[in-house]
């Protein structure tokens, strides 16, 4: 039986003093955890190193990572437990996207695609 899956977004901040390869290892662990627990990653964005608004664990900079994914509800508890145990993850936030927000985003993307197609169509030459 297929488990009910919802759409989630998660953003986490990794210690920016780590080297890029170390940050990539942490990101891969999170990806693996999501997929291993029945999830499917829809989007992944590395936002990069940024200055923190306030100091977290005596750190002023962090490496931001964003995932959008579908997963069963029980996978979220496992994911957040991993965030808590991973010492190099400074902060995290996971939110469930509601159906209205997903419909609004799909409509916005469809409208943007329609405008892009209309812009690419050849325009008639002006009459002289």
Image (tube, grey):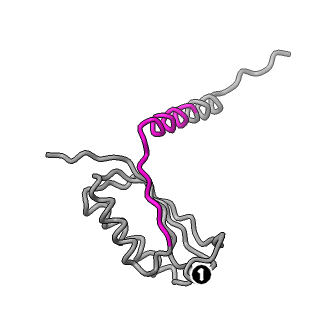
Helix, strand or loop status at disc 1? strand
Residue 52, quarter of the rendered image: bottom right
Quarter holding the C terminus? top right
Q: Can residue 98 be found in the magenta stretch? A: yes
Q: Residues within 10 Å of mark 1 (few under 14, many from 20)?
A: some
* x, y percent for residue 102: 45, 39
* x, y percent for residue 20: 51, 79
Majority secondary structure in the magenta region: helix
- Region rendered in magenta: 91-111
Image point 18% across, 46% down: which residue? 2
Looking at the image, the residue that sits furthest to the left is 1
Left or right: residue 46 compared with residue 121: left
Residue 80, quarter of the rendered image: bottom left
Looking at the image, the residue that sits furthest to the right is 128
Image point 34% across, 70% down: which residue? 81
Image point 36% across, 77% down: which residue? 85
């Amino acid at each position: 039986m297929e488990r009910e899956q919802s759409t989630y977004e998660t953003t986490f901040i990794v210690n920016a003093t780590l080297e890029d390869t170390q940050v990539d290892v942490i990101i891969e662990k999170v990806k693996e955890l999501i997929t291993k627990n029945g999830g499917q990653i829809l989007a992944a964005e590395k936002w990069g190193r940024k200055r923190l608004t306030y100091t977290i664990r005596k750190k002023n900079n962090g490496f931001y990572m964003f995932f959008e994914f579908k997963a069963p509800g029980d996978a979220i508890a496992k994911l957040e437990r991993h965030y808590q145990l991973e010492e190099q993850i400074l902060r995290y936030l996971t939110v469930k996207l509601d159906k209205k927000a997903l419909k609004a985003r799909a409509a916005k993307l469809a409208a943007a695609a329609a405008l892009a197609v209309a812009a690419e169509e050849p325009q008639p030459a002006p009459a002289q």
